[in-house]
Amino acid sequence: MLIPYRLMYRLGFAPWERRPVAPAWQRVTEGPGALPPGRALDVGCGTGRDAVYLAQRGWHVTAVDIVDDAIAKARQRAADEGVRVQWVAGDVSALGELGLEPGYTLLYDFGCIQGLPGPAREGTAAGMTELAAPGATLLLVAFAPGRRLLLPRGMGEEEVTGLFGDAWELAEAEPASDPTAPPPVRRARPTLYRLTRAKGPGGVPSP
């Protein structure tokens, strides 16, 4: 089922906008394992909470979303915070047609791909792979697979790794539950997947 994101924003039902931002990024932006700020691609950015957070910490962020109202709010958020983000109103399943420059060292999707039908999922994954720098980090949050009325049907680990193929290596998968999230979201058992882009030619890891 394709999640009607435009309608959900219009109705004010966007539970992903309530997710605490800072905890999701602590391991990426802080401590000995932190990534050096570089270029980041936000797939399905919504109102730009994550994009602005990273921009405040020195990242050069490109953020894509198909919902015009969400992009408008994201632009205002960045202006209010005094940071620059490249906002792109467009279809994430056609990233290759948006004129984006490859070489992103961090790519992330906190719930967008799992709400897309199969061909759109595949197109998004292919676009992210083409835009990623060798060795790039990919963060993806998805619910456990299941039938739901409004929330996405989710993706399991095999679906995630199968979707991104040999070009990416799964580094870890861990629960991403937020105790402050609405009960339906908690019951969907969100998981954070962290993948690394292969450095070898053709997406094959170097020996």
Image (cartoon, rainbow, N blue to C red):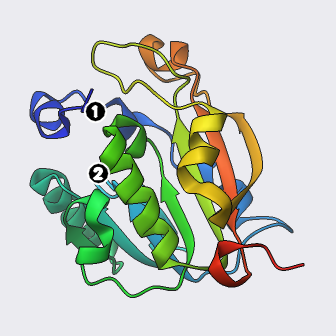
Instruction: Give the quarter of the image for residue 25.
Output: bottom right
Q: CA distance from mark 1 to mark 2?
A: 9 Å
Quadrant containing the N terminus in the rendered view: top left
Q: Give the number of the disc on residue 119.
A: none
Residue where numbered disc 2 is placed: 46
Q: Position of residue 56 (x, y in %)?
A: 48, 73
**Residue 197 sits in quarter:** bottom right
Q: Nearer the viewer, residue 73 or 93?
A: 93
Other-residue count near label 1 (Cα within 10 Å), few / some / many at <14 / 14–19 / ≥20: some
Q: Secondary structure at mark 1?
A: loop
Q: Residue 50: which quarter of the image?
A: bottom left
| Point 47% across, 28% down: residue | 154
Q: Is residue 9 above or below residue 204?
A: above
Q: Which residue is mark 1?
A: 14
Q: Label 2 amino acid?
A: Gly
Of mark 1 and mark 2, the one earlier in the sequence is 1
Query: Residue flagged by tag 1: what amino acid is it?
Result: Ala
Q: Position of residue 109 (x, y in %)?
A: 46, 52
Quarter of the figure that contains the C terminus: bottom right
Q: Relative to 26, does residue 3 appear above or below in the rendering?
A: above
Residue 55: give x, y in percent of width and height: 46, 74
Helix, strand or loop under label 2: loop
What residue is at 63 percent from the left and 79 percent from the top? 202
186 versus 22 height, above or below: above
